[in-house]
Image (spheres, rainbow, N blue to C red):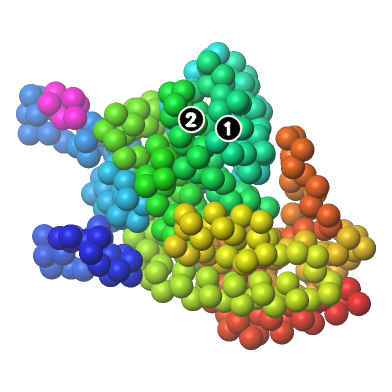
Amino acid sequence: MTDSHDHAFSTRMSHAGRAGVRIHGFVNPGVHRGSTVLFPTAEARRDGAAKRYEQYMTYGTQGGPTHYALEDVICEIEGGTRCTIVGTGLAAVTLPLMAYLKSGDHCLMPDSVYGPGRNVANTLLKGWGIETTFYDPCVDEAGMAALIRDNTKVVYTESPGSHTFEIQDIPAIARAAHARGCKVLMDNTWGIHTFQPFQHGVDVSIQALTKYVGGHSDILLGSVTVNSEEDHLIVRAAASTIGHYASPDDVWLALRGVRTMAVRLKTQEAASIEVAKWLEAQPQVAKVMHPALPSHPQHALFQRDFNGGCSLFGVVLDAKYSQEDMFRFINALKLYGIGASWGGYESLALPTTGFITRTAGTGDFGGQMLRIHIGLEDVKDLIADLQQGLKQLG
């Protein structure tokens, strides 16, 4: 699209990455499957190999037209220039860590990081001689500067934090990191388009496309987006070396899902705020962790840096309730599935107490916790279901 950023997000998602009249006039790009790529001459293959990170196919693992279309869409969403599609959201977390870190390096991760990301740091990275320090996600610029060592190469961020929804001061963290030559990585899945990472100092943006881009809880995908050719070559070379690849069929489903994402996000965000406000007023609830609520500790940062929210938030029950009480409440719900992931059309309620590891003194939440994802059901029905569930607590 010409001058695409002059258009609204919904318009851009309707047009980005489309083949248009170039492919016989069909609206959607086709599914291109393949491993072997043939060349007309040996010279052409030689020249193609030199450009293999420039969307020039030398072998199927480099991706194809279907992958390239989704890469274009993700760049349109996040404001980046180059994107690499991988098979899962966790693969999108691990790929840039492996691309930028080597033995003897030091990495900083927020204490609120996605659990499998913490596991990667404590197992694979540790085994490769890479040390990780987990820091308070609410650190300020001076605090971050004090944490950076001479061998710190990556400052990882995730805002809001997984399960507990702390908003990080990304611009301040990025200033401190860049002053010492560190790369800033960010898991931006929650703020998929409401937070523009490259406008706030992020070098590498990570997305679990499994969530809102897919939108229907039936694919696994991830993306790593950058805003410079230098970073693209680093990430793409690592992906090629490791053998990362995503199914073109799943990529095509993501392209299909993204066309309705703006509508789904708008509806689900509004419903989540309504549900969160209702829960906040219930006597059984100690607090609701939704960055869009004025009661959230970092609400001012959220208003400064985000232009909207999404459908995922946390709930802390009153301290008098036990884990068994929380389970009884969740088990009584009729419209909320009990399961991981989020971003689909269905509502979810997931116990999080007992599934959170904290090592930087940020683990006191004051009560049993659960995470709620609001789907596309009618908000009045969702609230009514929560109301009957809370009655199980007395």
The N terminus, quarter of image: bottom left
Q: Look at the picture and state if 42 lies above or below 368.
A: above
Q: Which residue appears at 59% of the width and 39% of the height?
A: 140
Picture quarter containing residue 335?
bottom right
Q: CA distance from mark 2 to mark 1?
A: 11 Å
Residue type (three-letter) at the residue carrying disc 2 = Ala
Principal SS element in the magenta part? helix
Residue 156 seen = no
The picture quadrant where one finds residue 178 is top left
Magenta segment: 46-51
Secondary structure found at label 1: helix
Q: Nearer the viewer, residue 37 or 115?
A: 115
Residue 211: which numbered mark, if any? none
Residue 303 point in image, percent of width and height: 51, 60
Q: Earlier in the sequence, mark 2 or mark 1?
A: 1
Camera-side residue of 232 and 216: 232
Mark 1: give few (<14), some (14-19) or many (20+) Cα within 10 Å: few
Q: Secondary structure at mark 2?
A: helix
Between tags 2 and 1, which lies in front? 1
Residue carrying label 1:
142
Q: Which residue is mark 2?
A: 177
